[in-house]
Image (cartoon, rainbow, N blue to C red):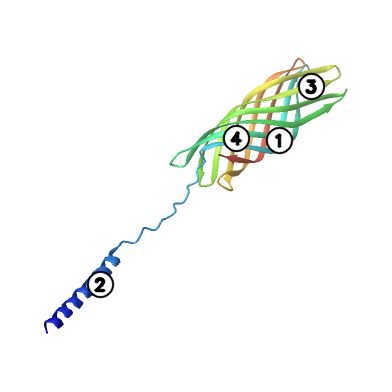
Amino acid sequence: MKAIFILAASAAMTASSVAYAADAVEAIPAAPIAVEQPVVFTWSGPYVGIHGGYGWGDGDASTAGGPDSDNFDGGRFGGFVGYNWQFSNGFVAGIEGDLNYDWNENSYAGGIDMHTGFSGGVRGRVGYAFDRALLYAAGGWTATNISVNGAGLDDDDTLHGWTVGAGLDYAFTDNVFGRVEYRYNDYGSGSLAGVDTDFNQHVVNVGIGVKF
């Protein structure tokens, strides 16, 4: 009888230990599941790009016979480099420089050719980012080279003025973006073969850039 009692007590203790162990296993907390945080796109940082487009230019020369105007329209190609700072409220500020070549040329009687060539500028930019779309306005300094050749003439001058415009940048990936913009360039006035000359230009550019 005593042996049966000891055997029953041992069985009860064994069952209790197994139940406690099972409860302990169930009480171990599960490892937390890693949640991947989405990457927030930002326009902040440096960038470079190329663009091409068309310019509608207007040149005025003050001659003895009075003012004389002519159109200097043509294609253009160039590049740009800049830096953006994006703030938490979505506003973006930046600075950008560009260098271009304009194929604007007119020919006149006597074998005289007049054209503009290299142009460039430095602009400040302000805008607002709608996620991957950046709508901006820009303005600053610009300059271009004009020249006249033929019939004993060989002269050129660099005109300095101001530029203003607006555009849209859109990021196709985290690093590659496209651009379309309009600019008005007022290059001021200078002297070309002894004639006071001024030049202004409306431009539409389409480009692609890489941000870092």
**Between discs 3 and 1, the one toward the N terminus:** 1
Which residue in the structure is indicated by mark 1?
77
How much space separates mark 1 and mark 4, taking CA atoms?
17 Å
Q: Residue 148 carries which label?
A: 3
| Badge nearest the viewer, 1 or 4 | 1
Outermost residue toward the right? Answer: 110
Q: Which residue is drawn at 57% across and 44% down?
A: 175
How much space separates mark 3 and mark 1, taking CA atoms?
21 Å
How many C-alpha atoms fall within 10 Å of the one at disc 4: few (<14), some, or many (≥20)? some
**Between discs 1 and 4, the one toward the N terminus:** 1
Amino acid of disc 2: Val
Outermost residue toward the bottom? Answer: 1
Amino acid of disc 4: Gly
Residue nearest the viewer, comparing 144 with 60: 144
* Element assignment for label 1: strand
| Badge nearest the viewer, 2 or 1 | 2
Residue nearest the viewer, comparing 78 with 199: 78
| Badge nearest the viewer, 3 or 2 | 2
* Element assignment for label 2: helix
How much space separates mark 2 and mark 4, taking CA atoms?
79 Å
Which residue in the structure is indicated by mark 4?
165
Outermost residue toward the top? Answer: 194
Could you tell me which quadrant the C terminus lies in? Answer: top right
Amino acid of disc 3: Val
Which residue in the structure is indicated by mark 2?
18
